[in-house]
Amino acid sequence: MIREITSLVLSRPHKQCNFIEFKEKKIVYKRCAGSLPAGYASLYFIACISKDENELITLEAIHLFVEVLDRYFGNVNANKRGLCEQAYYILDELFIGGYQQESSKKEILRICTQQEDYMDESKEEGFSRPRTGTR
């Protein structure tokens, strides 16, 4: 399924709309290339939604995610691929159970910065995750 969706999205001309009907779902995607240096591939953010959900609201949610990533990391580009863990923290602040939880960029950034501070403090104090599977 992921390969099919990837092929569909990547093969579409850039001027076509960002919505694709796919089986019993809809694919909504956003291509981000404007902030990338020359020679880098575009980044695509893709969401799969049910047929009865609103594509424009989904596209707006993707746009919000990209804006928050840009503010948190600087320009979102291919060099940022190694920062997936922080991107998932941001995604978790935006959505819970597939529903948008928070829409304020400032609030999301505040929470993520606070979470990063807590992580830094725990590293300084020498806390680590307990090992599992040891006897």
Image (cartoon, grey):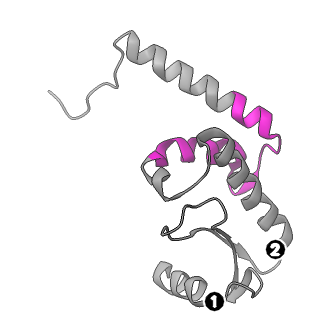
Res 66 visible: yes
State the SS at label 1: loop
Is tag 2's residue or tag 1's residue first in the polypeptide sequence?
Answer: 1
Residue 88 is labelled as none
| Residue 9 as seen in the image, left or right of residue 61 | left
Q: Is residue 131 left or right of residue 48?
A: left
Residue 15 percent coordinates (x, y)? 75, 86
Residue type at numbered disc 2: Glu
| Mark sitting on residue 12 | 1
Closer-to-camera residue (38/104):
38
Residue underneath mark 2: 55
* Residue 92, image quadrant: top right
Q: Which residues are magenta?
A: 83-110
Residue 27, quarter of picture: bottom right
Across and down, in percent, residue 29 comes to 68, 73
Q: Residue at x 47, y 14 (%)?
A: 121
Label 2 crowd (10 A; few <14 / some 14-19 / many >=20): many
User: Residue at point 63% right, 89% down?
Assistant: 12
